Amino acid sequence: MERRPLGNTGLQVSALGFGAGPVGDAALTEDAAAALLHGVLDAGINLIDTAPSYGASEERIGRHLQGRRGEFVLSTKCGYGVPGVEDWTGPCITQGIELALRRLRTDVIDVMHFHSCPIDVLERPGVVDALTRAGEQGKIRVAAYSGDNHALAHALNMGRFGSVQVSVNLFDQRALDWGVAMARERGVGVIAKRPLGNAPWRFSERPGAQDVALYWNRMRQMALDPHGLDWSELALRFATFMPGVATCIVGTTRLENLQRNVQALERGPLAPEHVSHIRDAFRRNDHGWDGQI
Ligand SMILES: NC(=O)c1ccc[n+]([C@@H]2O[C@H](COP(=O)([O-])OP(=O)(O)OC[C@H]3O[C@@H](n4cnc5c(N)ncnc54)[C@H](OP(=O)(O)O)[C@@H]3O)[C@@H](O)[C@H]2O)c1
C-alpha cells in the first residue's frame, strides 16, 4: 500500500485509510469488530480515524489494537461529550483528550481533530490554545481540524492546524478548488472523508438518511458515465489521487469491501480525461452544492 506524507506533519499515511465509524455500531459483535480492525492493519492500511461520537469505536480500537499500536497512525476528534463540562471550551478539549487517551489505551494520539466546530468556536478564547498545549505536552502529535466550507477556510487561515479532514468525493468537489489546494500550498495534511460519497448507488430509491440522500440526489443530477468501472472503484480512484489528498478514509464493516478497495487503488489514478469529465459534471450542476459536514 502506497504511503504518503500527511502534509508537513512528519507522519506517513497509507493512501487508503480506515474510517472507523461503523466499528462503533452496537449491531457489530465484539468478535466481528476485532476481526475487522485486525483485517485493516493486515491489509496494509495504517491510518485509523475515529471519534467519541462513533458509539463504541474508540473503546474497541483501544481494546483490540492496543498490542499493535506501533503499526498505525491514530486519528480521533474532540470538542464535546465530557461529562459535567461545557462543550467546546478549553477544559472540554483538555479533559476530552485525557478521556480519549484512556479509551484508546495509548499515551499519544497522532492526529486530534476538532470535530466540525463553527468559526465562533475557533475564535473562542482558550479553545485552540488547549489543543496546542496538548501538542506541547506530547499528548497529541498533530492538532487538526475536521470540517468544511467557510469554517474550513477559517481554520486553514488561522495557521494553527497541521492537518484537516474534509469531504471529497464524486458528489462533493468544491473543496478541491480551494480548501485542498490551500492546504497543499501550506504543507497542511488532507484526510478525505466520505470518499465514496456514502455509496449512494446502492439505493434504487431515495434513502432515508439525510447525508446519503443528499449525495443520492447529486449523483442523479450529475448523470456520470462510470466508463465500465464499478462505482466504488470510480469514486475511490477519483478521490484518492486528487492532488493534495494524502489519504481517503473509507468506512466499512465488511472485510470483502475493504479488500476490493485496496485492489481498486492498486489500479492507480483514473485517466485524466475521465477526471475532467467528472470535474466538469460537478461544476455544471453545482448550484449551492456546499461540502457536506
Ligand atoms: N469528521 C466528520 O465529521 C466525518 C463525517 C463523516 C465521515 N467521517 C469519517 O469518514 C469515514 C468515512 O465516511 P462514511 O462512512 O460516512 O462514508 P464513505 O466512506 O464514503 O461510505 C461508507 C459506505 O460505503 C460502503 N462501502 C465501503 N466500501 C464499499 C465497496 N467497496 N462497495 C460498496 N460499498 C462500500 C460502506 O458499506 P459497507 O459497510 O457495507 O461496506 C459504507 O456504508 C467515517 O467512518 C469517518 O471516519 C468523518
Image (cartoon, helix red, strand yellow):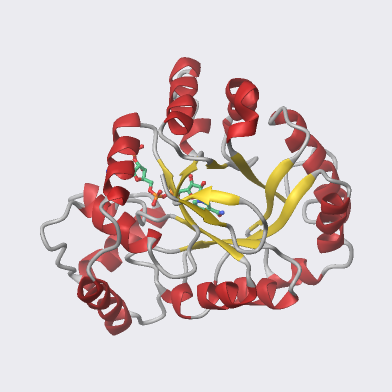
Residue 2 as seen in the image, left or right of residue 65: left
Which of the two residues, 206 or 16, is positioned nearer the viewer here? 16
Q: Position of residue 135 (x, y in %)?
A: 82, 52
Determine which quarter of the picture holds residue 268: bottom left
Task: State the residue at coordinates (65%, 24%).
Answer: 66
**Please, which residue is most extreme toward the top here?**
31
Quadrant assignment for the N terminus: top left
With respect to residue 252, does 56 lie above or below?
A: above
Determine which quarter of the picture holds residue 143: bottom right
Residue 111 as seen in the image, left or right of residue 96: left
Q: Position of residue 137 (x, y in %)?
A: 88, 47
Q: Position of residue 197 (x, y in %)?
A: 36, 57
**Tally of numbered tags:** 0
Which of the two residues, 98 or 132, is positioned nearer the viewer here? 132
Which of the two residues, 41 or 290, is positioned nearer the viewer here? 41
Task: State the residue at coordinates (46%, 36%).
Answer: 22
